[in-house]
Amino acid sequence: MRLRLAAALLLAGAVAASGEQAVITSQNAGAVSFVDPASGAVTATLALPGKPAAVAVDPSTGQAYVVAVETALLHVLSPEGVELRRIPLPGAPFGVAVNPVTHHVYVSDWQGAEIHEVDPERGAVLRSFATGAAPSGIAVSADGALIVTADRDANRISLIDAASGASEAVTVGEHPFGVTLRDGRAYVVNVLSNDVTVVDLARRAVIATIPVGEHPYALAFAAGKGFVTNQYAESLTVFDATSHAVLAEVPVGEYPEGIAATADGRRVLVANWFSDSLTILDASSLEILAEVEMPEGPRAFGSFIGPSLAPPGATAERAAR
């Protein structure tokens, strides 16, 4: 396995190890890899059929939820990499997110123009909420009260009350795909207009538009900066999280897709679909610390970093159902 590490990463590895791990889906290979963000070490690889693409990790339990787009299954994985169950999903599932309060899982239905709320413990779809056409990325507020979907073919986002299901829409750029929430704002990555729309969630209003690279896909925040993957440009656009001024463009691998940051904001991880690699970046210096070889076709669309072990008292099942 190819692993290139900067000296700074090697020296900082022991200190940076915070019990986190990245869960990286490889769609072409049909695999999920568990990676230590501090050292770049691949700690486990799990075969998972059906073209796994989107992934979300519960920030408190470390349980991972992977959507296999070919088989329309939601795979539930323990922090140790054990498959706990497979849940059939209606329609054409794609994006996935976890409610940090209820621990329910939301999955976007590309064809049905809705999202499905899943209870992962019961293995059941509880409710469905209407969205705009072709919903892709999903984000959930920290208090679990608001669900935001990027509705690609409607050029809008849907703002859904998690309790009542009531929804509103805000028009954004062309073909919104990834969406990330921060400080009462939604940052929406628009694939065809090559920009990020900033929406004030309280006012339900667009307050800024940030130009980025060609064919952007997803976004993460770290060290007071926003990082946007640009698929065609093979780069990250970096902007100031407060002023929204563009600060830099950083080359990464081929066709970068999923992106996430560690909880301490020190590192940003990028899945490069066409170069079969995971880039680990220092969020402050913008130095590339590591490039880790992945099974073919890594995508990791979603919040793919979480705790590496279940906390004491967690009751996650360990046998597949």
Image (cartoon, rainbow, N blue to C red):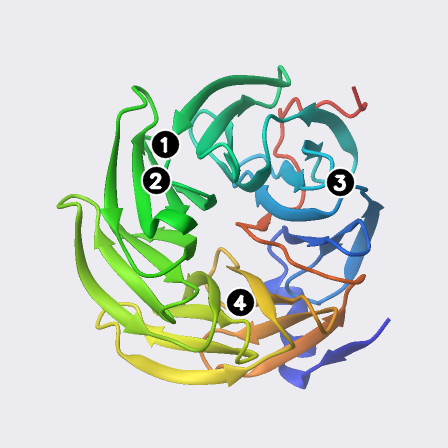
Q: Which mark is residue 144?
A: 1
In the rendered structure, which disc, 3 or 1, sits on the residue that comes first in sequence? Answer: 3
Determine the secondary structure under disc 3.
loop
* On-image quarter of the N terminus: bottom right
Q: Is residue 99 visible?
A: no
Left or right: 69 as drawn, with respect to 222: right
The 10 Å Cα crowd at callout 4, few under 14, some 14 to 19, many 20 or more, is: many
Q: Which mark is residue 268?
A: 4
Q: Farthest left residue? A: 203
In the rendered structure, which disc, 3 or 4, sits on the residue that comes first in sequence? Answer: 3
Q: Which mark is residue 31?
A: none
Q: Is residue 33 visible?
A: yes
- The location of residue 30, given as percent across then percent down, is 80, 49
> Is there a contact, CB below 8 Å, between mark 3 and mark 2?
no
Of the two numbered discs 3 and 2 in the rendering, the one whose residue sits closer to the viewer: 2
Q: Give the Cα separation between the discs numbered 3 and 4.
A: 22 Å
Q: Is residue 149 above or below residue 206?
A: above
Residue type (three-letter) at the residue carrying disc 3: Glu
Say which residue label 3 marks: 80
What residue is rendered at 43% in x and 69% in y? Answer: 227
Residue type (three-letter) at the residue carrying disc 2: Ser
Which quarter of the picture shows residue 26?
bottom right
What residue is rendered at 52% in x and 40% in y? Answer: 110
Q: Is residue 310 above or below residue 292?
A: above
